[in-house]
Image (spheres, grey):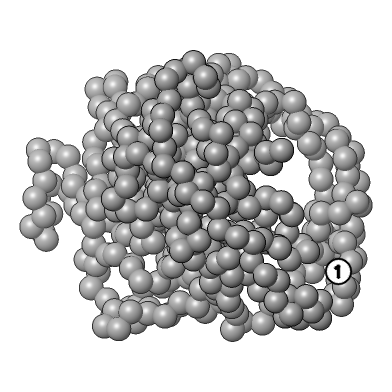
Amino acid sequence: MVGPGPSGMAPLENANPLIYRRSGERPVTAREEDDELPDSIDDREIFDISPPAFLNPAHLIRSINDPEHPLTLEELNVVEQVRVKVNDAESTVAVEFTPTIPHCSMATLIGLSIKVKLIRSLPDRFKLDVHITPGTHVSEHAVNKQLADKERVAAALENSHLLEVVNQCLSARS
Amino acid sequence: GAGAAVPRPGAPRVPVLVPGLEPRREPAGVLRRGPDCAAVGQGRACVPHPQRGHHPAPPTPGQGWACRAVLGEGHQRTVRRVAWSPCGSYLASASFDATTCIWKKQEDGFECVTTLEGHENEVKSVAWAPSGTLLATCSRDKSVWVWEVDEEEEYECVSVLNSHTQDVKHVVWHPNQELLASASYDDTVKLYQEEEDDWVCCATLEGHESTVWSVAFDRSGERLASCSDDKTVRIWRRYKPGNEEGVACSGTDPTWKCVCNLSGYHTRTIYDVAWCHLTGALATACGDDAIRIFEESSASDPQQ
């Protein structure tokens, strides 16, 4: 797996990223309030808020930190709700993410962070597909292939340094 | 349930067990992990863990499984594969810590008699040749290593094969020849044999469109099945020089040709394939939570 260089020691690849405004909080519906009804999982759920009780709270892909900038993936438009596809009945989740620049060397790390966040947050039944928005990265096939390889991902996450970097991306900013 | 297999229209009809239609049956004396399971070194029999609504009979004396040993000190990372030697006295374990341990069965457990080192990163698979004197390992470092063991239990690396261009996921030996097959992240299967005292790659099977996770030989060793992230199983047949089917070979080497592509049955990555040497049936392990069994119809062309 491609890991990041030591942070803070190299100039940022993309020193002036475009920053996108965060979308507002979604209003909670009456159906979601009703504890009797089973919670299904939809696109917005993955993207954002009020996760059902059995999900880990406060860990959502919109607020995953970018490894290089003090900004979230949502603020950089790396992840967008419209690029999250959930099929609760078939237990599949597909997330397309858009690196800020086509040569972004952090693409694998960002994809891995999204994947880890979903693995940790969703019920085991979900099959996850995390890949780069087509046409937005020079190595999209290679990155996608790594992210799709369960064995590679599992082995990479046994690397304590890489795991620490991923956990930093996933930690809530105060 | 997910993953019901529907044959493609126009595809040869091969009977396929559809998961979910067979009533689920538990074998007697089913083993469950639970607080009853023995810890390190103890030989206590594991008691089936009662499941809500399911009360299996306790194992009759002489039946059931007991955990005899926990070999917890051999590796520093995930143990990915284990393989018994043909004689049954040794166990090889391949680990993400880049080593392969060889364990010898003793009266009261297992002892690590040697650790095979050399791979640069995770070892993904280990396999014993039927002769019992050769071992193969493979790794994310793209290489396949062949090891020889002598009567004094000394292991020596006799070849490092760098033919693949990406991780090697699995190695499998031919059932009755010293021929080795490897499956790789580079989308190919490669075959190796000893030629004039050197191990060489003698064939490359191309066709899969993504990582090949596993391979299996049929009983005769004339056919090989491969399974892939591209959601297909491919069957390859060996053609010797001068074959009556007119398949071209270069020199004295046999050629392997893809004779079947089982496509449209699996909906996610296929991680493993097993070829029954008794019945000829193929079984696949798939990321869509289903196991599929394939059988050859008797009316099919033997060259398919």
Pointer 1: residues within 10 angstroms few (<14), some, or many (20+)?
A: few
Q: Is residue B223 visible?
A: no
Three-letter amino acid code at the position of disc 1: Gln
Q: Quadrant of the N terminus of chain B?
A: bottom right
Instruction: Work out which quarter of the rendered image holds the C terminus of chain B and state it.
Output: bottom left
Q: Nearer the viewer, residue B265 or A73?
A: A73
Viewer-side residue, B292 vs A38: A38
Q: Residue at 48% across / 70% down in the picture?
A: B293
Whether residue B261 is situated above or below residue B216 in the rendered picture: below
B40 displayed left or right of A7: right
Image location of residue B144, percent across then percent down: 40, 30
Residue receiving disc 1: B51
Does B28 sit left or right of A26 as displayed? right
* Residue drawn at x 45%, y 31% as measured from the top left: A2
**Residue at 81%, 45% in the rendered image:** B67
Tell me residue A169's x, y (percent).
Answer: 60, 37
> Which of these two is toward me, B116 or B194?
B116
Q: Residue A13 in the image: state x and y as whole percent.
A: 39, 28
Q: Residue at x 73, y 59 (%)?
A: A55
Kind of element beneath mark 1: loop
- Left or right: residue B78 versus residue A20 is right
Q: Residue B165 or A58: which is nearer the viewer?
A: A58
